[in-house]
Image (cartoon, rainbow, N blue to C red):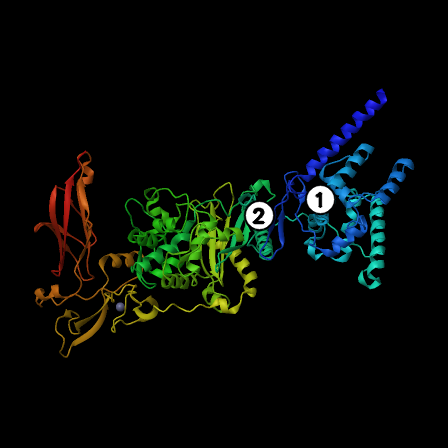
């Protein structure tokens, strides 16, 4: 009686168990592997796997479709479960045989169907015990009720143990053969198909398991040949080229993508693995050569300007080197750009009609409201042409131009071009010209992308996902004419350490580039446009320790050119040439003044010029005068036997002083004959121009600080002027040499400040002076 009730209870428990499992499986059908976490994979632009990340449970698992490789599917069915499509989840014949062998003869033998294996793997069953085996059988039966055959087989393809922490055949083919599952050869397929039989074999590498696997392969191969005929498969005596190589390319780049798209299983990157490897190899070799100088680290970014896709991205010289903080991504960290922003100052100055490439700029010691820039070499060149000032990276002319450009000035421009993390404008002042605003390589490349894309700003894309959700729409920030001129100038920048390389560049592949060196020699840059590429190179050490070797031209530019030279042969010829925009014309300017030439300017040179935008001032330096050859004096008379027409240079006094400082002698025009009427004098030449006080400026009289209560009076005058005379409200204040500052004590009110030169030519300015209310 008691035995019978015990039996009933047992039966009841078993029935409840079955019911529970049935309910589990009859719930709305879910994919068997749905709740599993899969690896994220990053592909390059050609579909090559760059990186496969571990799933949450530290496994490599890649979701693959049941029909991804029909041959693999066939081989697995041949090996594991030939009657898979015909049994109800359990194969009674093989099960009985296995039961008999395992438990009665103590010889372990399989006998599990694929469904049973999926049940064991997916639900972690211990099938070495009889209850475990029964559970496995029940799970398999129920699994067949709630899932299609293909779903079950697909689950097997995805979770079969393939050695180490590799689960499924897709990561196995990737890690062992470096191939997508669809590209496997028959040999490789047969190799993989037998792996789940003893997944530890690959790592254990003991002869017995290896022999076991080899035997299993031969066995499977025999069966395969029986089915397909002798000719279909190569024999297995060839060694298989197996490695255990988890793809880990472009680590900084892929890490950033994995973080950015942490919900995506497949991330389609824009980089090109081949270019990435070229850049990595060249950079690493270059660093090896420079190590003895204290150069340990570099970052490189290569972008396709046509779509702003990142093609290669190197975050540091060695990701695995902790001593150089190799895991820091140098492409994304912000630092001083040195002089690399100068082209945009010239671009804005051209945009605002202030200069053309031949405009003469002053390179002289100058103060700009308490900011006194030095040139990199600490010298001053005197007057210098705009294009030359940019190519030779002179600081003073760049700062002078920056002080004149407005709406937008450089700060506004950077802001519009998406440079982040900017402090307010006043924080930088004019020092922004020389790199006081820190920006990342990504931001710098985006800026040069504006030049490459004829004035249109486009955000960089590092993946095809990011291309779709680029936050900023493309927008025009410069005209195409100005971009054309700036690129034309930057192409004249000679290659480092080759005297006349501007010429060499032209015949080979023109490179428009600029270098930059940070203040204190902490690091340096080179960034260039060639073909349809933009390439930026940074060299430095992440610890920011200064070292005079960090010079953009001598350290960064050579690496940039090494990379360019290795890519150049692959660039299509047609992308090397671009035609000038319509409004770009050629015009002759005076070689002396850089202003538009008069017919009488003796030396004339052509320049590129933007019709309707570039400055139209004609040469004011070369003037025709009449000289009496008997006396050598200048004269108002235009005819007579001894009167001769001459072209003479009339330099404003400030430039004349500059030439003198730079050691370049300039002729001064001869004085007028003192016997001629002085009244005529004021009708010739150019009147003086007041430089201080400033136009439209209200001056504040300070109660507390008397030192600020003297107003400087300064004017520059024409070349033939010796003295200027200052007046306030017609009252004479005193005389001075041109370019010599006089002072006048401020008083509240409105005043008319005037200057007259010794030829009777004059300039006036009205100013308002008020009292500081504090
Ligand atoms: Zn001239």
773 in relation to 5, above or below: below
Q: Nearer the viewer, residue 298 or 379?
A: 298
Task: Determine the residue positioned at 78% across, 47% down.
Answer: 195
Q: CA distance from mark 1 to mark 2?
A: 25 Å
597 in relation to 135, above or below: below
| Label 2 Cα neighbours within 10 Å, binned few <14 / some 14-19 / many ≥20 | many
Residue 661, given in percent of the width and then of the height, sits at 30, 56
454 in relation to 12, above or below: below
Q: Secondary structure at mark 2?
A: helix
| Residue 244 seen by the camera | no
| Residue 648 seen by the camera | yes
Check the picture and name the quadrant holding the C terminus.
Answer: top left
Q: Is residue 766 left or right of residue 98?
A: left
Task: Determine the residue positioned at 40% across, 48% down.
Answer: 435
Residue 19, given in percent of the width and then of the height, sits at 72, 34
Q: Which mark is residue 159?
A: 1
Q: Secondary structure at mark 1?
A: helix
Residue 148, given in percent of the width and then of the height, sits at 71, 47
158 in relation to 669, above or below: above
Q: Quadrant of ligand 1?
A: bottom left
Residue 611, given in percent of the width and then of the height, sits at 31, 67
Q: Is residue 69 left or right of residue 272?
A: right
Q: Nearer the viewer, residue 338 or 224?
A: 224
Q: Is mark 2 within 8 Å of ligand 1?
A: no
Q: Is residue 505 left or right of residue 155?
A: left
| Label 1 Cα neighbours within 10 Å, binned few <14 / some 14-19 / many ≥20 | many
Q: Which mark is residue 254?
A: 2
**Label located before the other in sequence (1 or 2):** 1
Q: Is residue 230 left or right of residue 248?
A: right
Task: Determine the residue positioned at 56% across, 64% down.
Answer: 570
């Amino acid at each position: 009686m008691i035995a019978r009730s015990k039996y009933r209870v047992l039966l009841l428990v078993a029935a409840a168990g079955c019911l529970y499992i049935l309910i589990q499986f009859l719930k709305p059908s879910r994919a068997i592997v749905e709740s599993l976490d899969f690896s994220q994979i990053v592909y390059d632009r050609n579909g090559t796997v760059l990186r496969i990340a571990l799933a949450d449970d530290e496994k490599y698992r890649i979701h693959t479709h049941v029909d991804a490789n029909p041959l693999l599917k066939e081989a697995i069915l041949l090996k594991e479960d030939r009657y898979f499509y015909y049994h109800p989840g359990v194969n009674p014949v093989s099960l009985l045989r296995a039961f008999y062998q395992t438990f009665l003869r103590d010889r372990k033998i399989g006998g599990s169907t694929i469904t049973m294996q999926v049940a064991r793997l997916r639900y972690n069953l211990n099938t070495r015990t009889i209850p475990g085996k029964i559970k496995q059988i029940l799970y398999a039966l129920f699994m067949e009720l709630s899932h299609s055959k293909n779903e079950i087989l697909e689950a097997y393809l995805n979770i079969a143990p393939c050695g180490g922490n590799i689960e499924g055949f897709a990561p196995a083919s990737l890690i062992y053969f470096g191939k997508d599952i669809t590209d496997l050869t028959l040999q490789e397929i047969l190799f993989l198909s037998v792996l789940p039989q003893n997944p530890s074999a690959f790592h254990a590498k003991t002869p017995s398991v290896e022999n076991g696997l080899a035997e299993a392969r031969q066995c499977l191969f025999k069966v395969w040949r029986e089915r397909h005929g002798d000719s279909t498969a190569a024999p297995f005596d060839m060694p298989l080229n197996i490695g255990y190589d988890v793809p880990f390319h472009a680590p900084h780049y892929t890490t950033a993508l994995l973080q950015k798209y942490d919900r995506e299983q497949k991330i389609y990157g824009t980089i090109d693995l081949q270019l990435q490897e070229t850049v990595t190899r060249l950079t690493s070799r270059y660093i090896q050569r420079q190590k003895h100088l204290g150069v340990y680290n570099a970052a490189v970014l290569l972008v396709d300007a046509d779509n702003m896709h990142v093609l290669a991205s190197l975050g540091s010289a060695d990701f695995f080197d902790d001593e150089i903080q190799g895991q820091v991504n140098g492409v994304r960290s912000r630092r001083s750009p040195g002089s690399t922003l100068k082209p945009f100052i010239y671009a804005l100055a051209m945009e605002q009609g202030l200069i053309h490439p031949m405009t003469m700029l002053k390179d002289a010691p100058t103060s700009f409201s308490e900011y006194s820039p030095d040139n990199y070499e600490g010298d001053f060149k005197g007057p210098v042409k705009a294009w030359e000032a940019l190519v030779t990276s002179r600081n003073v002319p760049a700062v002078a131009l920056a002080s004149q450009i407005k709406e937008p000035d450089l700060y506004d421009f950077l802001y519009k071009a998406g440079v982040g993390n900017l402090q307010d404008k006043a924080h930088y002042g004019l020092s922004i010209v020389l790199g006081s605003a820190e920006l990342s390589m990504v931001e710098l490349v985006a800026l040069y992308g504006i030049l490459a894309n004829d004035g249109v700003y486009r955000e960089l894309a590092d993946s095809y996902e990011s291309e779709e959700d680029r936050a900023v729409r493309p927008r025009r920030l410069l005209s195409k004419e100005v971009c054309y001129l700036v690129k034309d100038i930057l192409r004249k920048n000679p290659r480092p350490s080759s005297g006349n390389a501007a010429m060499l560049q032209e015949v080979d592949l023109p490179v428009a580039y600029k270098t930059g060196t940070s203040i204190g020699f902490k690091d340096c840059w080179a960034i260039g446009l060639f073909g349809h590429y933009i390439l930026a190179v940074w060299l430095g050490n992440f610890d920011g320790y200064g070292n005079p070797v960090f010079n953009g031209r001598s350290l960064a530019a050579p690496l940039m050119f090494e990379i360019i030279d290795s890519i150049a042969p692959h660039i299509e010829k047609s992308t090397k040439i671009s035609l000038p925009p319509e409004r770009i014309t050629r015009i002759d300017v005076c070689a002396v003044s850089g202003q538009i030439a008069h017919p009488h300017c003796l030396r004339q040179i052509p320049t590129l010029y933007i019709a309707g935008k570039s400055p139209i001032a004609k040469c004011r330096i070369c003037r025709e005068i009449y000289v009496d050859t008997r006396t050598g004096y200048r004269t108002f008379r235009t005819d007579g036997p001894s009167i001769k027409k001459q072209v003479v240079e009339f330099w404003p006094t400030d430039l004349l002083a500059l030439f003198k400082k730079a050691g370049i002698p300039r002729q001064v025009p001869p004085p007028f004959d003192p016997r001629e009427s002085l009244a005529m004098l004021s009708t010739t030449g150019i009147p003086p121009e007041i430089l201080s006080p400033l136009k439209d400026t209200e001056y504040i009289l300070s109660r507390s600080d008397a030192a600020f209560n003297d107003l400087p009076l300064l004017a520059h005058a024409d070349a033939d002027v010796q003295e200027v005379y200052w007046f306030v409200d017609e009252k004479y204040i005193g005389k001075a040499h041109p370019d010599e500052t006089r002072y006048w004590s401020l008083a509240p009110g409105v005043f008319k400040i005037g200057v007259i030169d010794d030829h009777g030519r004059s300039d006036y300015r009205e100013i308002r002076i008020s009292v500081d209310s504090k």
